[in-house]
Image: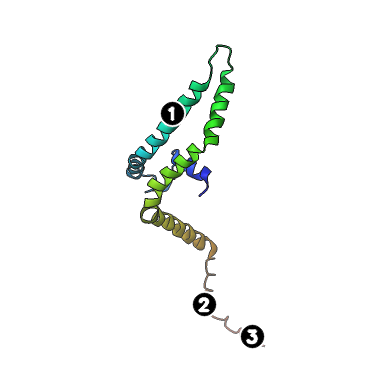
């Protein structure tokens, strides 16, 4: 799974399959990811505070430039990628085989069964049994 896919999932992109998207599953994942999420959030908050403490503030500063510099520093630190990986390993990996995999396999089987039904042509209709026409009796 790519980092972008992991990040997308971790930030709340939800699947539309029943079971995976059910409220109980989402609630369970949210509760279990909370410590890892809170840890990442605290690291980011500390990083931002430290970064801003190093900046000398003046009213003429370009705030967008300051924001972009901060954003680049956070991304370059690698902390977000590592934090998301930690969330994935703590939350998703333990559930992968016994929760998500069976649901994914079921969805694949349903999809393939639907494709198979579409691909199999209907058998040609049975020809109606017709008696051969009776020989004509010409009086010649």
Residue under the point 43% across and 33% down: 43
Which part of the image, by quadrant, shows the C terminus? Answer: bottom right
Q: How crowded is mark 2: few (under 14 residues within 10 Å), some or many (20 or more)?
A: few
Using a 10 Å C-alpha cutoff, classify the residue at mark 3 as few (fewer than 14 neighbours), some (14 to 19) or many (20 or more): few
Q: Residue furthest bottom?
A: 140
Q: Quick check: marks 2 and 1 in contact, CB under 8 Å? A: no
Q: Position of residue 24 (x, y in %)?
A: 32, 43
Q: Is mark 2 on a helix, strand or loop?
A: loop
Q: What element carries label 1?
A: helix
N-term-proximal mark, 3 vs 1: 1
Q: Distance between the residues labelled 2 and 1?
A: 86 Å
Badges 3 and 1: C-beta atoms under 8 Å apart? no
Q: Would residue 100 appear left or right of 67 to someone viewing this image?
A: left
Q: Which residue is drawn at 50% across and 50% down?
A: 1
Residue furthest toward the right?
Answer: 140
Looking at the picture, tell me which residue is in the foreground, 86 or 136. Answer: 86
**Mark number for residue 129?**
2
């Amino acid at each position: 799974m790519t980092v972008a896919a992991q990040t997308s999932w971790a930030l709340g992109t939800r699947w539309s399959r029943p079971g995976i998207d059910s409220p109980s599953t989402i609630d369970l994942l949210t509760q279990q990811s909370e410590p890892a999420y809170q840890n990442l959030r605290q690291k980011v908050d500390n990083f931002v505070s430290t970064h801003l403490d190093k900046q000398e503030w003046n009213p003429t500063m370009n705030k967008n430039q300051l924001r972009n510099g901060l954003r680049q520093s956070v991304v370059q630190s690698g902390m977000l990628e590592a934090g998301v990986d930690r969330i994935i390993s703590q939350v998703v990996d333990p559930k992968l085989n016994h929760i998500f995999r069976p649901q994914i396999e079921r969805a694949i089987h349903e999809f393939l069964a639907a494709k198979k039904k579409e691909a199999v042509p209907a058998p040609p209709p049975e020809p109606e049994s017709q008696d051969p026409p009776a020989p004509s009796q010409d009086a010649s």
